[in-house]
């Protein structure tokens, strides 16, 4: 992890085509990628996939409601929602427009802007600053104003690819905190990474989606 303050030039953002693919492939490939907002950057270590209309656990399962409408739009956009009345969650829309698939960014490691992230959660250890979807959004300073924001250009929210793919073995298991379709193994995380959220559940090495 590095300290806060100004950072150097950003790496190129992922291309639109990166997100215009099946959600399980995008989810796995996001491990090791970096999401950047303002001075803070987080390297992604844990994600969950949601498959839109065919996934009863997805916000899109009931169609394009006002909250979930952005999920039905073009890929490579942020879908940010408020949960439990306490925190925001960042999702990245993928697959062709109308599919309403998205990947929830569950956890990561702060690799830039550490002082800013610490100031936003002064009681947390560094490894916990983005450990869980709510903490990750707080560390990055993300809120609902970013819903619909493209993440593949030079806007305020940018996803940067992992140069060599995930750093280490990838595990897969059930999604966290969902009742419908709870047995689908659509949660991916980096094995033995201390920034992955505390509930890990049974895991196995996945086949490549």
Image (cartoon, grey):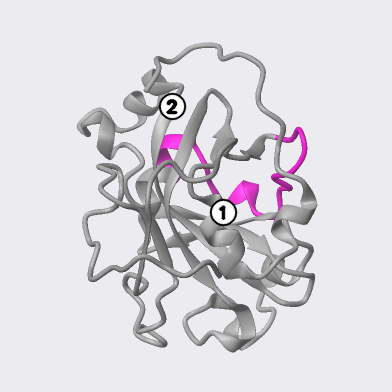
Left or right, 164 with reference to 175: right
Q: Nearer the viewer, residue 8 or 115?
A: 8
Q: Nearer the viewer, residue 197 or 192?
A: 192
Image: magenta residue range: 137-155
Q: Is residue 60 magenta?
A: no
Give residue 109's position: percent from left, percent from top.
38, 36
Residue at point 68%, 64% (across, down): 94
Query: Mark 1: which secondary structure?
Result: helix
- Residue picked out by circle 1: 29
Left or right, 123 with reference to 78: left
Q: Earlier in the sequence, mark 2 or mark 1?
A: 1
Query: Mark 2: which secondary structure?
Result: strand
Q: Kindly identify which numbered label has been placed on residue 178.
A: none
- Residue picked out by circle 2: 111
Instruction: Please say if 147 is above or below 138.
Output: below
Badge 2 crowding class, 10 Å Cα cut-off, few under 14, some 14 to 19, many 20 or more, is some
- Residue 34 occupies which quadrant of the picture? top right
Residue at point 38%, 45% (across, down): 168
């Amino acid at each position: 992890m590095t300290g806060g303050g100004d950072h150097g030039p950003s790496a190129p953002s992922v291309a639109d085509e990166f997100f215009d693919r099946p959600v399980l492939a995008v989810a796995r490939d996001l491990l090791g990628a970096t999401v950047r907002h303002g001075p803070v950057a987080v390297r992604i270590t844990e994600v969950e996939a949601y498959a839109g209309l065919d996934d009863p656990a997805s916000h899109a399962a009931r169609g394009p409601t006002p909250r979930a409408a952005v999920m039905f739009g073009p890929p490579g956009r942020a879908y940010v929602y408020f949960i439990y009345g306490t925190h925001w969650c960042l999702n990245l829309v993928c697959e062709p427009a109308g599919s309403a698939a998205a990947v929830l960014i569950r956890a990561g490691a702060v690799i830039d802007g550490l002082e800013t992230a610490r100031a936003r959660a002064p009681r947390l250890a560094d490894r916990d600053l983005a450990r869980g979807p709510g903490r990750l959004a707080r560390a990055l300073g993300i809120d609902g104003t970013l819903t619909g924001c493209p993440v593949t250009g030079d806007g305020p929210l940018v996803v940067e690819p992992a140069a060599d793919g995930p750093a280490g073995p990838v595990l897969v298991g059930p999604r966290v905190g969902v009742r419908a379709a709870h047995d689908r193994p659509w949660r991916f995380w980096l094995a033995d990474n201390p920034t992955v959220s505390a509930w890990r559940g049974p895991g196995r090495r996945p086949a490549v989606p």
